[in-house]
Amino acid sequence: MPVIKEYEDDEVVVFKSNRPEAPVHLLVVPRRHIESLKNAQDNDIQVLGKIQLMAKKMAEKFEISDGYKVMVNAGKFQEVPHIHYHLKGGMN
């Protein structure tokens, strides 16, 4: 299944989930490999902060600023061994 990118730069990529759980379901992913939030280090602060702000910008772009979820899974709840944040919204 092709990836539908909504944003990309040197540090972060945003694309639509191929298994959406909400009308808007995007993944915000750092390009640099960080296996999991539980493995994040102090030198990851900048990219993790950028992910948070990018989620906010994407919520504005997709007109879900009135309410959305930003989620990250770790440990036994993480299916993919590369940190990624879910932005979900558009539910009533």
Image (spheres, rainbow, N blue to C red):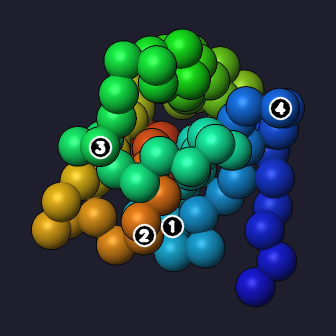
Do the CB atoms of the residues marked 4 and 1 lie less than 8 Å apart?
A: no
User: What residue type is disc 1 on?
Assistant: Pro
- Gap in Å between the C-alphas at discs 4 and 2? 21 Å
Circle 2 or circle 1, nearest the eye: 2
- Gap in Å between the C-alphas at discs 3 and 4? 21 Å
**What residue would you read off at disc 1?**
20
- Give percent across and percent down for residue 27: 56, 50
Could you tell me which secondary element the residue under label 4 belongs to? Answer: loop
Residue 90 visible to the viewer: no
Report the residue at 64% width, 42% height from top: 32
The correct choice, above or below, for 52 with respect to 75 in the image is above
Disc with the residue nearer the chain's start (4 vs 1): 4
Report the residue at 47% width, 46% height from top: 34
**What residue would you read off at disc 3?**
39
Label 2 neighbour load within 10 Å: few <14, some 14-19, many 20+:
few
Disc sitting over residue 10 in the figure: 4
Circle 3 or circle 2, nearest the eye: 3
Disc with the residue nearer the chain's start (3 vs 2): 3
Report the residue at 27% width, 53% height from top: 73
Do the CB atoms of the residues marked 2 and 1 lie less than 8 Å apart?
A: no
- Gap in Å between the C-alphas at discs 4 and 1? 25 Å
Disc sitting over residue 80 in the figure: 2
Please tell me which residue lies in front, 57 or 33.
33
Could you tell me which secondary element the residue under label 3 belongs to? Answer: helix
Circle 3 or circle 4, nearest the eye: 3
Disc with the residue nearer the chain's start (4 vs 2): 4
- Gap in Å between the C-alphas at discs 2 and 1? 16 Å
Screen quadrant of the N terminus: bottom right
User: Looking at this rendering, what residue extends furthest in the left direction?
Assistant: 76
Could you tell me which secondary element the residue under label 1 belongs to? Answer: loop
Disc with the residue nearer the chain's start (3 vs 4): 4
User: What residue type is disc 3 on?
Assistant: Asn
